[in-house]
Image: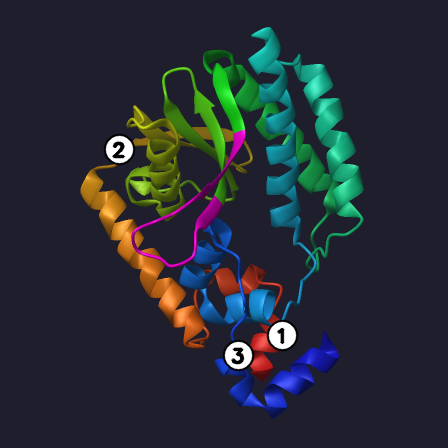
Amino acid sequence: MAEAVSEISSDRQVGTATTIMPHLSVSQLKMYLRCPLQYFFRYVCGLKSPPTGDLTLGRTIHQTLNDNYKQKMKTGHDIIIDHISELFSEYWDREARETEFAKGEKPGQFKDDGVGLLKAYFDQIAPGVQPIEVEREFLIETPGTRLPLKGYIDLIDDQACIIDHKTTKRSFPENTAEKDVQLTAYSLAFRTLYGEEESGVRLDVMVRNKQPKIQQLYGTRTQADIDRFSRLAGQVENAINSGVYYPNEGYMCGICGYQGMCEKW
């Protein structure tokens, strides 16, 4: 990445470059909204930064939950917690090798936290969830963009509720599910795929406190919310095509893998 930093620093005009994309993904949209320069480094320059400990923890918990709910679709039963802990540990041990931990971070503590979060989740949440779709892929046309929108809905339960899983160090505000852009995209995809409205949207949040905490945050989506999302996606697509990239400094900067490059941009 050091060579890439030098090249980008010596020629700011590279910021006008665009990439030929077959689609606009939900993850791309979220990254651009979070920080346009982060999007530039990742999707225009094609530079992949090593995952942080927080990202690896979230990803390995997500993989573990996917395995559980895929089995539960077939059997109607969750994997027992001892096997869930073993499954998570296998994912974590493999992913941790490619992870860049910050100074002072202990990989073993992340792993212990992950096991604790999963135990709390399987005690409080999993028994009440019966999935009908897990990681449901979609590629849909939207009225606001020229490119189709691609993504994966984490989970749809038998009550037609869209559920997304999050892992965090701090509790989310109670209205997060009402405003979350990702859930709005999933709502649009659900209605396009199934020709009906979902019953609601929900965030299942696993908070890494000393005592693991689980939040369930509920929300709904109106057609006005869907229309606003379509306009937002169109504006992001236009900005990308116009080469509009700039740093959006905020609390996420401290865990961004492109921090060093951003400072030299």
Above/below status of 204 relative to 59:
above
Residue denoted by label 1: 260
Q: Residue 148 in the image: state x and y as whole percent.
A: 43, 51
Looking at the picture, which amino acid does disc 1 mark?
A: Gly
Q: Quadrant of residue 204?
A: top left
The quarter of the image holding the C terminus is bottom right
Assign a secondary structure to mark 2.
loop
Q: Tell which circle, 2 or 3, labels the residue nearer the N-terminal end.
A: 3
Badge 2 local density, few (<14 within 10 Å), some, or many (20+)? some
Residue denoted by label 2: 220
* Residue at 79% across, 38% down: 93
Confirm whether the magenta stretch covers residue 161. Answer: no
User: Which of labels 3 and 1 is toward the front?
Assistant: 3
Say left or right for 178 vs 78: left
The answer to whether one can see residue 220 in this image is yes
Residue denoted by label 3: 17
Above/below status of 35 relative to 195:
below
Looking at the picture, which amino acid does disc 3 mark?
A: Ala
The quarter of the image holding the N terminus is bottom right
Q: Residue 232 in the image: state x and y as whole percent.
A: 30, 58
* Residue at 69% across, 52% down: 105
* Residue at 39% across, 32% down: 193
Segment colored magenta: 135-150
